[in-house]
Image: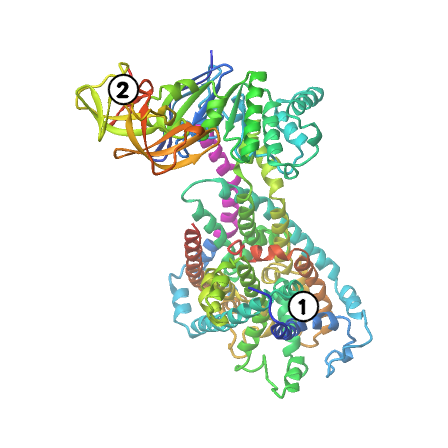
């Protein structure tokens, strides 16, 4: 065997193989375990019932039951609200902070802080703001003649309250990615458009936006994948309530597993959510590869 | 794009001022509430000037072993960071250098491991760790966090390794160095900034994590995020202590943003935006 | 014993073959240049010798030992890379030390070798600098120094001058030649620049599309090109080529005809290509009966010489004449081909018809 071939084989064995094994053991194995559980009657609240094989019963329960579908709809509803607001707001702020003005670097740095904060802390500080009777948010709103709003105690507002906290934390992410992309754009098309006498809006919608599209698509996919997993903020703010109005997939699984101790049902729901997220991830990778291919 | 006119500049600054006030307000609240006396915690209008008190911080460390929880967070975060950066660099190097039509699939498979919802695997983790006696130990969290941190490191480091010219490795191999030595003496030192960035991201992720820490630890290995949450009990919410604890927890992230924001884009988008 | 031998060496990437059975013998101390356009397989061949690419088929030996499956480090070669491949995180001295470390020499020997090499290459004042603090020419010399300290059996150069500006290139080329004379080490050198090849080589190997077209001294490949490719690739400006046919013992091409020099073997009716170097087209007296009419289309003044773009019959040709003899464009002159310097090739195969 040639040296380069031997070397490549050794790169695989020494460098890649251990990582694959480690990830297999720590990720795939638990997933398979979840798969195994999902076919059992694994009820920790009733330890006297034997943990027998129950076939597709758990799946049947999950998929036919109202709460799971409700959780699924809630998840996508929340995703739709947060993603659209983050997109518009993030691009808007990115356009502002990429102006050639003094102090933009500092503004951008400050705006990045929310992303680096633990979601639990985000949940807690918004809880502080939303807190019934005491919270400052209603006070601020009353100053401009609005409110008061029962942020986390009313089924009308709770999901929006969660969305606002998520928007606060992750709009900077869209802003940051867009600003980076904006600054890497070649200035020539702008100069050409200016010479041709196009309006600002024309330049933005016809020149800037099409060039930003691949980056925006990536950013939105990453946000969507994260939004599907949202847990911490809701756990802190509403625990899924009031009246299940903010119970997303993660909360549903949590409640099945750790409130009702029905591990089998929780595992079945987990598996369904794994399949849904897999679709999202696959779409994202496809778009990434297309992006790479078009870059040549 | 050219320089905005004075009128446009005023407009931009005004809008940004409003945006900054809105986005910084929660952070201001954390900082100010952590040193505000409890009686005026919710006073309206909010007092911007008030007698600073350290009682919440004192309470935080005396009423509960918060120092121990911070220690736990540190052990878990540093442990997972070290392991993940080591493993991730190895994998990244292989993916960067192996020319094979399936290598992209392997890379995407690794990345997908980071994207799955943690809640879906928390039950199996719980049962597995219980069986092997790792429940409520830092090691359990180190393992779990590494499943997210290794993929992140792989993708970040791949970008950095791609930028090290292969000619340097070829020169070293003609000069008499083997595969591992070349990696250790040439490639890795040249990708050192990537190691730093990966390490910081792994650290922050582990430090901030809540769900697994809540499920897989009890009183022994509890981390700071879980501990802070526990001040929120139904009978009496200890806002002062919560804010003091929150402030301590957000310090590493803020330091990171202030010191190396130019790497943030790459890290948070896992290399898909540079 | 030869320093390097390639016997039917083939390189394949999957189904694509990029080097087709190269045979080559390089003697001890010889300076051999692999010359050809980009994509001709010359760099791949060099990299196979270095051990940076596996040999797909055939046999490669260095110093009488088959090295097909040996690691680069066990082949006793040193290489200068196109972009120099200096370790950017090490100083010049550390770059050289790093190249010597695997040899496990005594510290005093290492220091002496580095000092000697630095002296020869004029690097002594730069030893504590890093590559980023050096100019292109200096980096080039460090790359050579790093290869030299190891006192290898064979030096490999991969387009070492391609990143230098024209003036520096001439100077470094001269230095490389001088170094080779001084050290006497075998050199295998890849370039696409014929001037480098002609000035440096003991032996030139001209490659095209993965095949060796011709191996020979600079004089041989210039005076006796074996193929039309070599004929047009070597020499500047390029050799003029005319397609024609053999009719009653003469080469005839629309409007012109020539007697066939005795050293060519042709058969009646054969399609041939005639080659004539621009310098072998002479301006003739206006009453020269054997001369041809040529209309001057463009004149390029080069200092000592001038290039005339000529239209002779239906053929476009370039002539190189003394600058003093240059002619205004648009005029028609009489020219004569130096028949002793004609080259004849088979039009189908492109191979020389010389006996």
Chain that bears disc 1? B
Identify which residue is drawn at 75% across, 59% down: B67
Residue position marked by numbered label 2 in the rendering: C353
Tag 1's secondary structure? loop
Q: State whether the magenta stretch is mostly helix, strand or loop.
A: helix
Q: Is residue C334 above or below residue A229?
A: above
Residue B230: mark in rendering: 1
View extreme (bottom): residue: A145
Is residue A267 visible in this depiction of the protein?
A: no
Q: Write down the quadrant of residue B248 in the picture.
A: bottom right
View extreme (front): residue: C287
Left or right position of B78 against A291:
right
Disc 2 crowd rating (10 Å Cα; few below 14, some 14-19, many 20+) is some
Q: Is residue C15 above or below residue B234?
A: above
Bounds of the magenta segment: A1-28
Disc 1 crowd rating (10 Å Cα; few below 14, some 14-19, many 20+) is some
Identify which residue is drawn at 62% across, 38% down: C88
Q: Is residue A185 above or below residue C318?
A: below
Q: Tell me if residue B46 is in the magenta stretch.
A: no
Left or right position of B30 against B5:
right
Residue C354: mark in rendering: none
């Amino acid at each position: 065997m040639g040296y380069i071939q031997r070397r490549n084989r050794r790169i695989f064995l020494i460098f890649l193989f251990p990582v694959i094994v480690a990830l297999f053991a720590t990720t795939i194995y638990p997933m398979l375990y979840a798969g195994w559980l999902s076919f059992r009657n694994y009820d920790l609240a009733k330890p006297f019932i034997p943990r027998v094989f129950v076939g597709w019963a758990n799946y049947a329960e999950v998929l036919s039951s109202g709460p799971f579908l409700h959780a699924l709809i809630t998840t996508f509803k929340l995703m739709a609200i947060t993603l659209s607001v983050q997109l518009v707001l993030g691009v808007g702020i990115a356009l502002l902070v990429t102006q050639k003005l003094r102090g933009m670097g500092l503004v951008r740095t400050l705006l990045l802080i929310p992303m680096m904060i633990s979601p639990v802390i985000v949940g807690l500080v918004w809880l502080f703001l939303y807190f019934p009777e005491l919270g400052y948010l209603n006070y601020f709103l009353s100053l401009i003649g609005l409110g008061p709003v029962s942020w986390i105690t009313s089924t009308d507002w709770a999901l929006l309250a969660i969305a606002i906290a998520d928007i606060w934390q992750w709009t900077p992410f869209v802003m940051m990615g867009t600003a980076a992309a904006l600054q890497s754009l070649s200035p020539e098309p702008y100069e050409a458009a200016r010479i041709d006498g196009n309006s600002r809006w024309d330049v933005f919608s016809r020149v800037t936006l099409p060039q930003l599209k691949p980056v925006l698509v990536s950013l939105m996919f990453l946000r969507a994948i994260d939004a599907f997993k949202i847990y911490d903020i809701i756990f802190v703010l509403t625990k899924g309530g009031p009246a299940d109005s903010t119970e997303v997939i993660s909360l549903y699984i949590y409640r099945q597993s750790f409130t009702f101790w029905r591990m089998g049902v929780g595992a079945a729901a987990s598996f369904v959510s794994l399949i849904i997220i897999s679709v999202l991830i696959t779409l994202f990778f496809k778009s990434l590869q297309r992006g790479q291919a078009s870059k040549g | 794009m050219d320089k905005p006119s004075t009128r446009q500049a005023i407009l931009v600054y005004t809008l940004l001022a409003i945006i900054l006030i809105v986005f910084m307000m929660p952070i201001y609240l954390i900082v100010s509430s952590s040193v505000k006396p409890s009686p005026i915690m919710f006073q309206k209008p909010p007092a911007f000037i008030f007698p600073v008190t350290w009682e919440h911080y004192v309470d935080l460390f005396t009423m509960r072993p918060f120092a121990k929880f911070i220690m736990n967070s540190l052990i878990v975060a540093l442990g997972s960071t070290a392991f993940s950066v080591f493993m991730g660099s190895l994998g990244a190097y292989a993916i960067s250098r192996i020319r094979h039509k399936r290598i992209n699939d392997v890379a995407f498979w690794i990345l997908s491991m980071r994207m799955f919802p943690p809640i879906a695997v928390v039950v199996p983790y719980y049962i597995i760790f219980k069986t092997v006696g790792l429940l409520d130990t830092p090691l359990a969290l180190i393992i779990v966090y590494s499943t997210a941190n290794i993929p992140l490191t792989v993708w970040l480091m791949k970008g950095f390794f791609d930028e090290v010219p292969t000619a340097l490795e070829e020169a070293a191999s003609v000069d008499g160095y083997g595969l591992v030595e070349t990696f250790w003496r040439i490639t890795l030192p040249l990708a050192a900034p990537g190691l730093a960035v990966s390490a910081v991201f792994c650290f922050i992720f582990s430090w901030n994590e809540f769900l697994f820490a809540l499920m897989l630890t009890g009183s022994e290995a509890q981390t700071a995020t879980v501990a802070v949450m526990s001040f929120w009990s139904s009978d009496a919410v200890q806002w002062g202590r919560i804010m003091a604890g929150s402030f301590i927890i957000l310090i590493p992230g803020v330091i990171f943003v202030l010191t190396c924001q130019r790497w943030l884009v790459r890290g948070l988008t896992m290399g898909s935006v540079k | 014993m030869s320093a390097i031998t390639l016997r039917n060496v083939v390189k394949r990437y999957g189904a694509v073959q990029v080097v087709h059975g190269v045979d080559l013998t390089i003697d001890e101390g010889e300076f051999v240049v692999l010359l050809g356009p980009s994509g001709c397989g010359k760099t791949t061949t060099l990299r196979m010798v270095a051990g940076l690419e596996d040999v797909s088929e055939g046999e490669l030996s260095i110093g009488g030992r088959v090295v097909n499956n040996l690691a680069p480090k066990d082949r006793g070669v040193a290489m200068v890379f196109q972009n120099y491949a200096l370790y950017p995180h090490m100083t010049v001295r550390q770059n050289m030390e790093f190249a010597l470390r695997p040899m496990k020499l005594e510290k005093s020997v290492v220091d002496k070798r580095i000092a000697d090499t630095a002296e020869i290459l004029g690097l002594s004042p730069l030893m504590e600098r890093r590559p980023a603090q050096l100019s292109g020419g200096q980096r080039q010399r460090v790359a050579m120094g790093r290869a030299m300290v190891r006192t290898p059996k064979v030096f490999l150069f991969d387009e070492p001058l391609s990143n230098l500006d024209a003036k520096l290139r001439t100077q470094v080329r001269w230095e490389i030649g001088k170094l080779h004379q001084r050290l006497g080490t075998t050199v295998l050198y890849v370039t696409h620049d014929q001037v480098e090849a002609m000035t440096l080589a003991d032996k030139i190997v001209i490659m095209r599309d993965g095949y060796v077209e011709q191996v020979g001294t600079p004089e041989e490949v210039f005076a006796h090109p074996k193929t039309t490719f070599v004929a047009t690739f070597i020499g500047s400006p390029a050799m003029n080529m005319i397609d024609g046919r053999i009719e009653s013992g003469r080469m005839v091409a629309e409007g012109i005809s020539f007697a066939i020099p005795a050293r060519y073997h042709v058969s009646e009716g054969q399609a041939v290509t005639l080659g004539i170097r621009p310098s072998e087209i002479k301006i003739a007296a206006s009453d020269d009966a054997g001369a041809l009419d040529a209309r001057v289309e463009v004149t390029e003044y080069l200092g000592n010489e001038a290039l005339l773009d000529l239209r002779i019959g239906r053929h476009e040709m370039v002539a190189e004449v003394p600058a003093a003899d240059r002619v205004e464009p648009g005029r028609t002159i009489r020219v004569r081909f130096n028949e002793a310097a004609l080259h004849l090739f088979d039009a189908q195969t492109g191979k020389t018809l010389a006996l």
